[in-house]
Image: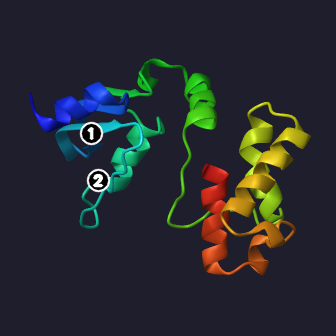
Amino acid sequence: MSDSATMNDDRSLVINCEKVTRTYNEGPGKLTIFSDISLQVSAGESVGIVGSSGAGKTTLLNLLGGLDKPSSGHIDICGQDIHRMSESGRARFRNRHLGFVYQFHHLLPEFSALENVMMPGALGGRGVRQASEQATAILERVGLGARLGHKPGELSGGERQRVAIARAW
């Protein structure tokens, strides 16, 4: 038995991709971004996705997040085939189980750090008070407890990234 098989017996898989291919129609032909990628990530495991520009890193993350569909292959996230869900089902799943931190933070400029972090919880059905309490606790964990009321334009680049991380948490 391989070391990776032993690891997967000890911890549950949170990501399981099997033979995933993504192609796009480009004029009369097809552009293959990647082909037959398999990836398993267990609970508690940290993974980095690296590659040159245009290698398909963002495409893979969009597939894992249910923002795009594979041309072929199978993707399970937390034991669920997210690509068999309806669009609204995938949106609910993302809200409850996934967080994204993009290179550009995409914070809403008219809202405070606290309000930006509260947004997914409030949209996901938590009450405003519960979302506020959770957002405050997370912002304190990332060292921004004193900056709750500051808007993105009043924060440094690093602070904005930490707000984005807190929002994804």
Q: Is residue 127 left or right of residue 17?
A: right
- Residue 22, numbered circle: 1
User: Tell me, what colour scheme is on the image?
Assistant: rainbow
Q: Determine the residue positioned at 42% across, 24% down.
A: 83
Mark nearer the N terminus (2 vs 1): 1
- In the image, residue 71 lies at what x, y percent? 28, 31
User: Which three-letter amino acid code belongs to the residue tagged 2?
Assistant: Gly
Query: Where 158 falls versus 38 (above or below)?
Result: below
Q: Quick one: 27 or 77, which is closer to the camera?
A: 77
Q: Which dot marks residue 44? A: none
Residue sitting at the far left: 1
User: Is residue 2 toward the left or the right of residue 73 in the image?
Assistant: left
Question: What is the spatial separation of the Cα atoms under label 2 and label 1, in whole angstroms?
Answer: 9 Å
Residue type (three-letter) at the residue carrying disc 1: Arg
Residue in front for this viewpoint, 155 or 28: 155
Q: What mark, if any, has residue 56 been given in the picture? A: 2
Q: Position of residue 119 (x, y in %)?
A: 77, 47
Say if residue 70 shows up in the picture. no
Asked if marks 2 and 1 touch (Cβ < 8 Å), the reply is yes
Instruction: Name the residue furthest right.
Output: 129
